[in-house]
Image: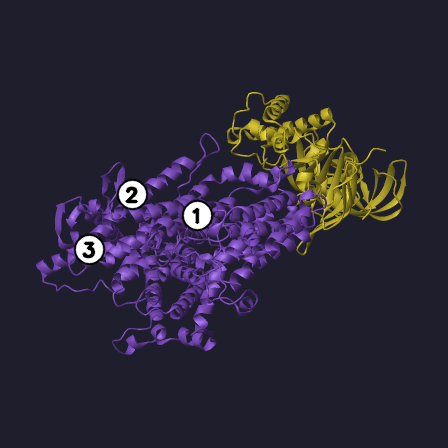
Chain colours: A yellow, B purple
Amino acid sequence: MAEAAIRFDSVTKTFGAVRAVDSVSFDLPRGALVTLLGPSGCGKTTTLRLIAGLELADSGYIEIEGSDVTRLAAAERRIAMVFQCYALFPHMTVLENVAYGLAVNGARRAAAEAEARAMLASLGLEGYEARLPAELSGGQQQRVAVARALVLRPKVLLFDEPLSNLDARLRRRVREDIRDLQRRLGLSIVYVTHDQQEALAVSDLVVVMREGRIAQMGTPTELYEEPADAFVADFMGEANVLAGEILFAEGGKARLVVAGVEVETAMRLAARGAVKLAVRPEAVTLAENGSGIPGRVARAAFLGKIREYEVETEAGTLFVTSPAAAPAYPAGAAVVCRLERVIPLKA
Amino acid sequence: MGATSLARAALACAAFAILFPPWYGLEGGLAGWPGGDAAPLAVLVAQGRSWWLWPIPLALPAAAPALTGRGTNGRLLIACGAGALAWAFLQGFAIGTPGQAWGIAETLAGVGVSQPAFGWGAALLIAGAVGLVAAGFAAQGAFGGDGFISALVLGSAALLVAFVFAPLLTILSAAAVEAGQISPGAMLARLGAREAWSLACVRGSLGCGVVWNTLALAVLTGILSTLLGLAFALLSARGAVRGGRAFRALAILPLITPPFVVSLSLIVLFGRTGVVTQFLSSVFDIPRSRWIYGLPGVLLAQLLAFTPIAFMLLEGAVRQIAPSLEEAAATMGARRFTVFQTVTWPLLRPSLAAVFLLGFVESLSDFGNPLVLGGDFDVVATRIFFAIAGARHDPGRAAALALLLFGLTLGAFALQTAWLGRRRYVTLTGKGDSGVAAPLPRGLAIACGAVAYPWLTFTAVVYAIIMLGAFVHDIGRGDMTFTWRHYITAFAVEWQNGPAFTGAAWDSLFSTVEVAAISAPLTASLGILLAWLFARQTFPGRRTLEFMAMLSFAIPGTVVGVSYILAFNVPPVELTGTSLVLVICFVFRNLPVGMRAGIAALAQIDRSLDEASATMGATAVSTLRRVILPLLRPAIVAALAYAFVQAMTAVSAVIFLVSARHNLATVYIVGRVEAGEITLAIAYCSVLIVIMLAVVLGIDRAVGSVRIGRRAEVEAMRPAPLPMAA
């Protein structure tokens, strides 16, 4: 079994009274793009910096490709990092920036510059070598930062919220570029973001963090369809959390009681009894009448592709999205909510 | 740099120090080397002359195992280095000039044993020993195992202790010494002396104690310069006034002129035979008097000198107030005056307090103006001078007064820190938001104008007198015929098989330029390195070291001067009378300015640049060299220019340290003023101003700005923060 790219074993990091990373353990496989995802303050950036060596763990054990790096400083680990603000040296040209890592580690100037040129060409930046960072666009700056990191052939490449400085349109293109690069070169990448869409789109593995601990770790599909608790369910894509009771569950279908109404819905296997359920907004269909939970539309909004509704029901306010092609219901209309699919939560 | 390479370098330095340079510092230079007086340590010990030095060469082979580089033993290195240091100083203090040896030394070595002070050999050995200790600490893992940082921390700590703290302690002990004995009672008596604290002027017509004089002057200067500066700042930043450039140009002048230039000009204008006095006497029959000599004159001089600085700092503060705050108040119905009263003024209060304290401290340390214009009105700084250089020579009294002065400035700084906290930098390039600042309320604008414009004109006249006075026969007596006489007397050059500098002023000018040119780069580099150390590295004892470095900022120049003569007058460290002591004095006096410029500049360089460099494998030194220093060029320029200007215009510290061979321009000028040759003094001042302008502009052009983009150039010559009075 191949060594993990990164192994954390009960790693803790405290700042003053705050436990930014609380006894976190995981194994990240090689050649995969792993995303650390979570809200502000959950510890994902601290974890990234612990991998990089910019912070040293207070306790625990960190291993990169089999070597113990727990007490090594950043300069001694074979990692490279792309910073949120790119951190390109403003007084050096693009070529000098990319060649920096090689120069600092003793390579001769001619050789370092040749390699830098090749790397820039492979990222589509040929002809920009003599420019200064301030003379590049945001997307170009980011590619220079990536080139600078890649030229060192690191064991692990780290990205700290790389898309947050780009405008929305550019984000999709750049995240696809990063994914393609990773696949092409078989890199091990650890990627930090607070945007769950981004995480879902590019990752092989997602680690959802909360208050210094791992809430759940798995593939995007696993996390979306089988969240462990209400927090993960709501973080990975909006979820309505309802209380209900399972009467009967078998063969991918279940009969439940929700808000006093008996409903039949698709659901994975779960034990009978009272349970908390997560229902995705797109998994609720509105109808004028029929079987389902009755309710009244409180607010309706048209968003082009979809319509968003807030529906007041006995079970609480449900957030529902419907495709634009479906019949529209105005505010105040009485509707029936049919639950197509629900997810039972463990906690 | 690793611990081992540092250890090797230190050992090499120490070995060199023992074998080649003269151990003792003597007048004769290298005469008779390697024998005679200029012998290195090896020869001295071998010939049995100063046999008590033998433990020192032993430190080298003891530390030699470090050269093999296998498992460098940190403890051994520390022990050897510390041992060599301790012995060097111990024997230096034990055996000094004839008759000053310790009892135990005389018992062992014979009565009447003596040795001269440390020379280059000793200095290099001490440097090597400190390097060994630093290498030892780095080998033990301190400072992240980085030898460079270890050397920097320990080296600067050693220098600060030697040249800031030890002299201070000497003052303390000198104040307590009475007739050769340490007597706390004597110190208390001196500190509470009548000459310092008497309140006779309140009740009668006798003068008050100098401490009260000094405080009164300082408070007045602080308040008035703040108010004047505020008037200028409000007009410049908020009034629709086109005088902004004139204000700023005049604001630069006091920074590059010797401090008592203003006093000279005032004498020429208002002295007993001054231009204005003559005019008033002949036209309005107002009797001539010597009113300018005393509190009014000194106050006027200090205001003229400090108001421009107050203006620059307050202008920055006014510009920093986000216009949107005032706009919000206006949209809620507040009229212009109410907006000023309820929004602008409260936001300005912290800056006003900071500027007041600054003026207060500058006045406390001012020496040149009270010396020239004081008359019977003495302040502590001048009293100290007379206690050393005057007829009643009394080092104990001088030391006690120095302690009092130091206490006052320290108190003011403590107040500033406690009151204003860490927010001490007023950024002078206010990044305003997109709002437009509201114009001043009408009444206020008029009031400010009524104060500011006359003052502006007055300041312009005062400086114009300088340039005028240099070129006319005798401006003091109204003789306005054009002449080169003064320049000829001062700067005559004759041709006798090569240029012969026969003018009276050349010696001091050459000395001054030489000392300034040597000390400025040293000050700037040490200041920037320390700034980097404090802003970017963490290590145990950082706060203490930072405090020690900044402490020298709080010590008035006179106190420094006195402490140096008391501390460095006798072996083993005998520096008075040399130009080295002048260089050292300048470096440590002006260090805080370089440090502050560096810290402020480093705050603007994002840490992610350091981190990016680290993740790519660069050591701290590599990052410093390749990334940080190039981006620090503006700060380096500011520090260099500042250090140079301060060295050229310093008076209060160096007036005690000059000698016949190494005189400085400012001291020479003061001498001319005392002798009544005011016009010659003025001519010399004008030359100094021209030189400093040339150098400052030259430094700016040479080291200049950092190009970080086609349209983005970071400029060097922004007004520098917080100058210290000379």
At numbered mark 1, what does the secondary structure look like: helix, strand or loop? Answer: loop
- Tell me which residue sits at (40%, 54%) in the image: B344
Kind of residue indicated by mark 3: Val
Image location of residue B436, percent across then percent down: 39, 44
Residue tagged 3: B268
Vertical order, B712 against A184 (above or below) = below
Report the residue marked by disc 2. Answer: B690
Question: Which badge, 3 or 1, comes first in the chain's sequence?
Answer: 1
Q: Looking at the image, is mark 2 or mark 1 earlier in the sequence?
A: 1
The C terminus of chain B appears in which quarter of the rendering? Answer: bottom left
Q: Is residue B342 visible?
A: yes
Q: Chain of mark 1?
A: B
Quadrant placement of the N terminus of chain B? top right
Q: Which residue is mark 1?
A: B31
Binning the other alpha carbons within 10 Å of mark 2 as few (below 14), some (14 to 19) or many (20 upward) gives few
On the same chain, marks 2 and 1? The answer is yes
Left or right: where does residue B333 sit relative to residue A265?
left
How many numbered callouts? 3
Most foreground residue, B388 or B524: B388
Q: Nearer the viewer, residue B222 or A167?
A: B222
